[in-house]
Image (tube, rainbow, N blue to C red):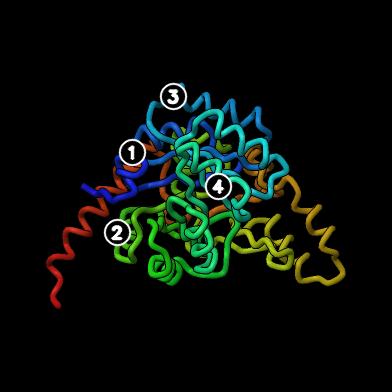
Amino acid sequence: MIKSKICDLLGIKYPIFQGGMAWISDASLAAAVSEAGGLGIISAMNANADYVRDQIRKCKALTDKPFGVNIMLMSPFADEVAKVVLEEKVAVVTTGAGMPTKYIKDWLAAGIKVIPVAGAVAFAVRLARMGATAVIAEGCESGGHVGEMNTMALVPQVCDAVDIPVIAAGGIGDGRGLAAAFMLGAEGVQCGTCFLVADECNVHENYKKKIIAAGDSDTIVTGKRLGHPVRSLKNHFSRQFAEMEKNNANTDEQIMAFGAGSLRKAAVDGNETDGSFMAGQIAGMVKKEEPAKAIVENMVKQAEEILSKTSNLVY
């Protein structure tokens, strides 16, 4: 059976995290993934404490398995959400868009496992020194906010640089990616795009259909000019955003205003023209909607089959 030290550390069956996707990763999806044996994660996004507390309590009602909360540290509500996870005794906190310096000591003291996202070796090293339980090394193949390094190059370098468990992320959506992550030295994986089409995912049906219809080259990275690059599916919005970035006549403020609320338009409203359908490069591998349990178990089964064949390799 596929198992690593992160499973014992977190009390989960399989070393598979579900990514904290804003407007998407709610209690329903997180609970389904945790029930399937992985680690479901609720996205705190830019929401306030009341929303996050409500989602945590809904998740507790749906599963008695460990789950986590992802905190975007740039959120104006980060301070109050940091307190909520303490009060609600959440098992795991993942973080992104910043360093959790001001919170990590209290979280660790409360027994919370802190697993931040890092897109570069230097960040991973700093996080390990802070006392992070593990680190998620996320390559630019992922959906949403991305860094510069590819997963294949980033993960082994992070594994060499830190002595805490490393979770691989970015461009991983099936058992082949899970097996490859182990070969790179990781203790598990974090996946987002493949869970967008889970039956328990409450994202708009138009979003799911666009993921399933996507091909290998149907994503685009925008936002580099603003310092916050984002990978999403190509559509009218993302192409126009890219054109606005190229045109020096547009100010950064105008570009930011154009993009405001675009993810919500996609995830909640299903607006295929003006929405930002954030997705990773594995979108072309996703072919159908199915339960989260099937996604997790098929990933594990495929990885087991691949890894069992490595003993037959000729050296």
Q: Nearer the viewer, mark 3 or mark 1?
A: 1
Which residue lies most toward the top here? Answer: 61
- On the picture, is 273 further left or further right than 192? right
Identified at 50% across, 68% down, the residue is 121
Instruction: Give the CA separation, mark 1 to mark 4.
Output: 21 Å
Q: Amino acid at mark 4?
A: Ile
- Which mark is first along the chain, 2 or 1? 1
Residue at label 3? Answer: 62
Tell me the SS state at disc 2: helix
Q: Can you tell which mark lies on residue 11?
A: 1
Instruction: Give the CA separation, mark 4 to mark 2.
Output: 31 Å
Residue at label 2? Answer: 179
In the rendered image, the vertical position of residue 64 relative to residue 201, given as above or below: above
Instruction: Give the CA separation, mark 3 to mark 4.
Output: 28 Å
- Could you say which quadrant of the image residue 311 lies in? bottom left
Q: Amino acid at mark 1?
A: Gly
Instruction: Give the CA separation, mark 3 to mark 2.
Output: 30 Å
> Could you say where residue 52 lies in the image, as x and y percent from the top left?
60, 32
User: Can residue 215 be seen at all in this image of the molecule?
Assistant: no
Q: Can you tell which mark lies on residue 270?
A: none
In the rendered image, the vertical position of residue 313 relative to residue 114, given as above or below: below
Q: Can you tell which mark lies on residue 104?
A: 4
Q: Amino acid at mark 3?
A: Leu
- Which mark is first along the chain, 2 or 4? 4
- On the picture, is 144 further left or further right than 242? left
